Image: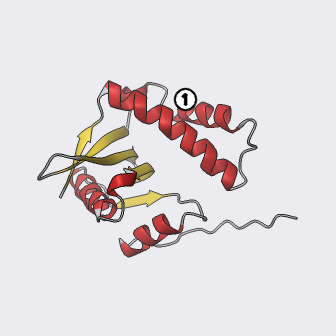
Amino acid sequence: MIQLRPMTETEYGDWRKDSIKEYAEEKTKAGNFKEESALSQAEEEFNTLLPDGLQTINHHLFTLYHEENQDKVGTLWVHVKEEQKEIFIYDIKVLESKRGLGYGKAALLALDSFAREMGLSKISLHVFGHNNIARSLYQNSGYEVTNVLMSKLL
């Protein structure tokens, strides 16, 4: 149902700009970044993780397409850890207009196939605690909680 196509340079530029902004907002909402420095901290993390952009070794950035009608439905960024036989999902995003239609689950199934083809046996990810929709998607797709970090504001 979903095709994982490597991002083009143009798609990457648009995705990177939007993702840095969204990541800064999420980290601020989670209490990890201060609002005044969130954007620069997020950009610094992206620069560290993707120093060579689309050509960064062992990182795969995909645009997600519906197989039948070829509509773009979202994006996916993963890091392959070959020695651990694992993929780590850094970012998965379904376009707002396409949410609630099963594309997130379909994208995760397509990633399962990609991982198996590479001989990998595990997929991991991080999800913000306040993102109940994503947490539900992952749990319904067979992901299990491996760690829980909790905080209390005083």
Is residue 85 at all visible to an observer of this figure?
no
Rendered view: 124 above or below 5: below
Lateral position of residue 22 relative to residue 117, left or right: right
Question: Between 78 and 67, which is closer to the camera in this rendering?
Answer: 67
Q: Position of residue 151 (x, y in %)?
A: 75, 65
- Tell me the quarter of the picture where residue 154 sits: bottom right
Q: Residue lying farthest left?
A: 68
Is residue 26 at all visible to an observer of this figure?
yes
Lateral position of residue 37 relative to residue 3, left or right: right
Q: Position of residue 27 (x, y in %)?
A: 65, 49
Q: Position of residue 81 (x, y in %)?
A: 41, 47
Q: Residue at x 24, y 57 (%)?
A: 110
Q: How is the image coloured?
A: secondary structure
Q: Position of residue 6 (x, y in %)?
A: 26, 37
Q: Residue at x 34, y 31 (%)?
A: 11
Q: What residue sits right under mark 1 in the picture?
A: 47
The amino acid type of the residue labelled 1 equals Asn
Lateral position of residue 24 relative to residue 105, left or right: right
